[in-house]
Amino acid sequence: MIDVILKKGKEKAVLHRHPWVFSGAIEGVKGKPANGDIVRLVDSKGGFMAYGFYNDQSRVALRLLEWNENVEVNESWFREKVTVAVASRNSILVDGVTNTCRLIFSESDYLPGLIVDKYAGHLAVQVLTSGIENMMLVIIDELQQLLNPESIFDKSDASSRGHEGLETVNTALTLAHPPERVEVKENGITYNINIAEGQKSGFYCDQRDNRKIVASYAKGKKVLDCFSYTGGFTLNSLQNGAASVTSVDSSVLAIDTLKENIALNHLNGLQATAIVSDVNKQLRKFKDEGETFDIVVLDPPKYAPSRSALDKAARAYKDLNRMGMLLLNPGGLLATFSCSGAMNMETFKQVLAWAALDAGKQVQFIHQFCQPEDHPVRSSFPEGEYLKGLLCRVF
Ligand code: SAH
């Protein structure tokens, strides 16, 4: 196995079991590993530190896997990690209630670059590192043995693949192609999923718990669900007896699916209005028309893809939330989210405080939202934490 030598003074993060080693922290390489090979990371005196995937195309040149020198990182090592991750989701998957979740969440499940989502009997995978790509035959075999899925679809069209010098993929990995429509259940609500065409891997299962919490306030209320996608917050609110729900998303496909989902769940379509529009424009329109709501949900896409984009993103979050607050009846609830990893909870609260000042409103934070247990945050990898939200009472 090839040795990669770490620069002196760069040991701390590795010793703390952070799984990334940036190219700038590498002193040299004894040999010529291919991208995706497993190498030994050694300190400047040649002492073993960890095993990891190598990739000289990526800013993250090493993705560390194992810190125990005596443990061989072989096929069974990967099979075990897959097995443990899949088993740890058992409590989420309840017959007749929930049959969709994230089974493997990359670094947070000790498999850097592998994401696996379950959609009823189908799986969608994203392969974001060359190291995982090399192990895919073993990983797929293990998934097949564990779950016997009807199909496994590769949704690796994420831009991060480019950083590893990998091509974009969007194909079935098993003989069977997933059907155009797959019906899944989450907290007893049925959703149509288009695995091949949908956003991300087809469904935002990271909001499962938060949809339920928001909906618990919805009985008899007038709800506005912004960035609704296929209706996660909308359907839960209708199910919980909302007086009306207005859903806004810029994607025609998302809104069409949302309407299908309302019918699929036999919910009252008369209480639902679905609008294809830019949220910022639509909020201004509601303001001009004097429209108000009891609950406003704001679940925008990632505004800050990196730390350097944070300032600009903070302004966008502030403007969006200010508008949301202005549309609330006194004492109404704003359920607001950020899925930008670069924006932490402290900064998000600050952004909400600015928005409240600008809107001339008083805000109480009454609940903090986070990502659910199938998107675990590994203590040595804080970068895995990305989804946060606040439930605000607005006066
Ligand atoms: N709340 C959803 C997930 C939202 S994902 C759920 O529970 O499933 C973000 C959504 O924002 C996507 O559906 C995307 O189409 C939409 N979107 C992105 N930019 C938008 C904009 N400017 N106006 C309206 N919708 C937008």
Image: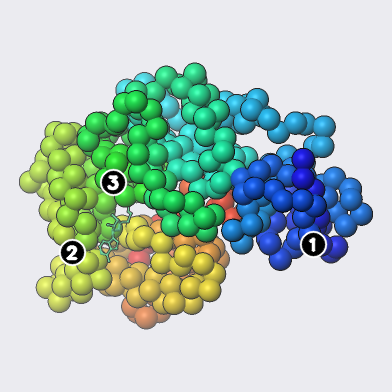
**Residue 260 higher or lower than 304, as above or below:** above
- Dividing the picture into quarters, in which one does residue 333 lie? bottom left
Assess disc 3: are there few (<14), some (14-19) or many (≥20) residues with their C-alpha within 10 Å of its C-alpha.
some
- Dividing the picture into quarters, in which one does residue 354 lie? bottom left
Q: Which secondary structure, mark 1? A: strand
What percent of the width, then of the height, locates residue 105? Answer: 52, 42
Marking on residue 277: 2
Write the residue at 16% across / 34% down: 264
**Residue 285 higher or lower than 239, as above or below:** below
Please name the amino acid that badge 2 sits on. Answer: Ser
Task: Tell me which label, 1 or 3, sits earlier in the chain.
Answer: 1
Q: How many marks?
A: 3
Out of 378 and 73, give the one closest to the viewer.
73
What percent of the width, then of the height, locates residue 331? Answer: 31, 63
Assess disc 1: are there few (<14), some (14-19) or many (≥20) residues with their C-alpha within 10 Å of its C-alpha.
some
What percent of the width, then of the height, locates residue 119? Answer: 35, 32
Q: Which secondary structure, mark 2? A: loop
